[in-house]
Image: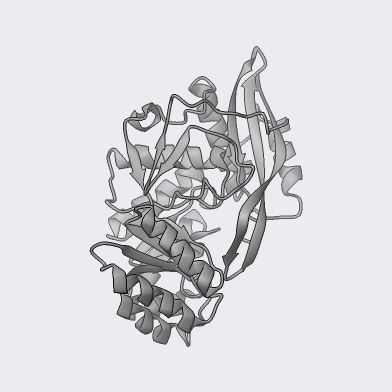
Amino acid sequence: MLRATYTRYILKFKQPAGTSRGILTEKETWFVKVWYSEQPEIYGLGECALFRGLSADDTPNYEKKLAYICQNINTLMLYELKGLSSILFGLDTAIADLNNGGKRIIYPIPFTEGQTDIEINGLIWMGDKDTMRQRIIEKLDAGFHCVKLKIGAIDFEEELDLLRYIRKQFSKEVVELRVDANGAFTPQEAPRKLEELSRYDIHSIEQPIRQGQWEEMAILCRNTPIPIALDEELIGIEVSDKSKLLDMIRPQYIVIKPSLLGSFSGSWEWIARSQERNIGWWITSALESNIGLNAIAQWTAYLQTFLPTGMPQGLGTGQLYTNNIPSPLEQTGSTIRYNPQVNWDLSQISF
């Protein structure tokens, strides 16, 4: 008989992480464990990567729902997981792990054998101008060919100065620049700000205005001087509305975050619909621990075996925390890889 349990875990940031929605110093997450009662020593582990204030399943009774699902793991009906993206992501990962022998292998592919790696972007969190400048220098010195800046919290002119600083040293052929506004602009000011950003050969901007303003976003995407990527816009959208959203807004890109978009199946629906419409995409983690990041990285590597995007992915979040789960994931320069010679250390997790 299949059994399941869960535990809450608080991830601690090494440095405060600034976004236009505020400054993060810690991140709540939940781990789920599944096993067969006949072999309790072999178990699968997943992360129900709830993102407070962003996840569609962020509700006051979240833990109660997770407890119910674990207690009823053998009789659970698919409809009972509807709208519970982070829980579905955790269960998908844990069950796949169990089916592969409980070794944290979600997809047995060359990536998990250490034979391939994934190109990633360097993420620059918001901070004061000097702090952000120093972080930019560190990423460029580390060899990143793609840098993503969080914008929208400090003075816009100072943000433009940072972009100008990069472009004075590196052309777009050497360093790809992405920016993420997290919905910080108003529809009225967005056109002007996009025009000013376009002077610095920006690859794309994620979510320039807040989600839910489909008509305004559609107008922006039709007239933008910078390719626009939808991010938060995709969260909580029903299956029946996915095509409608893409057809109405017609973005240049979408950003895939499995723990926020209905796990791997829900994320694949977005990718398939985007492929049909010639809309680009890349995959990004959403502040998961190494448990969730491992699953996303393996899924990304699996997709790249038959559907390569040719673009850096957003999987560089494994070094954010002081108490992350030690794992075989290794970030070297601008790549992330899985080292099968390194063991997982799960001693910090207590069920």
Q: Which residue sits furthest left?
A: 173
- Residue under the image location 70 percent in, 42 percent down: 9
Compared with residue 320, is residue 340 higher up or lower down, i.e. above or below?
above
Say left or right for 42 vs 221. Answer: right
Q: How is the image coloured?
A: one colour
Compared with residue 265, is residue 252 higher up or lower down, i.e. above or below?
below
Q: Which residue sits furthest top?
A: 38
* Residue 285: x %, y % from top left: 49, 50
Instruction: Pick whichever, 206 or 348, lies toward us.
Output: 348
Q: Is residue 177 visible?
A: yes
Task: Check the picture and name the quadrant holding the N terminus.
Answer: top right
Report how many numbered discs are placed on residues in the image.
Answer: 0
Q: Quadrant of residue 172?
A: bottom left
Instruction: Pick whichever, 283 or 4, lies toward us.
Output: 283
* Residue 118: x %, y % from top left: 35, 43
Q: Is residue 56 visible?
A: no
Say left or right for 251 vs 47. Answer: left
Task: Check the picture and name the quadrant holding the C terminus.
Answer: top right
Instruction: Pick whichever, 110 or 160, lies toward us.
Output: 160
- Residue under the image location 53 percent in, 35 percent down: 93
Compared with residue 337, is residue 26 higher up or lower down, i.e. above or below?
below
* Residue 305: x %, y % from top left: 29, 38
* Residue 336: x %, y % from top left: 40, 42
Q: Quadrant of residue 205?
A: bottom left
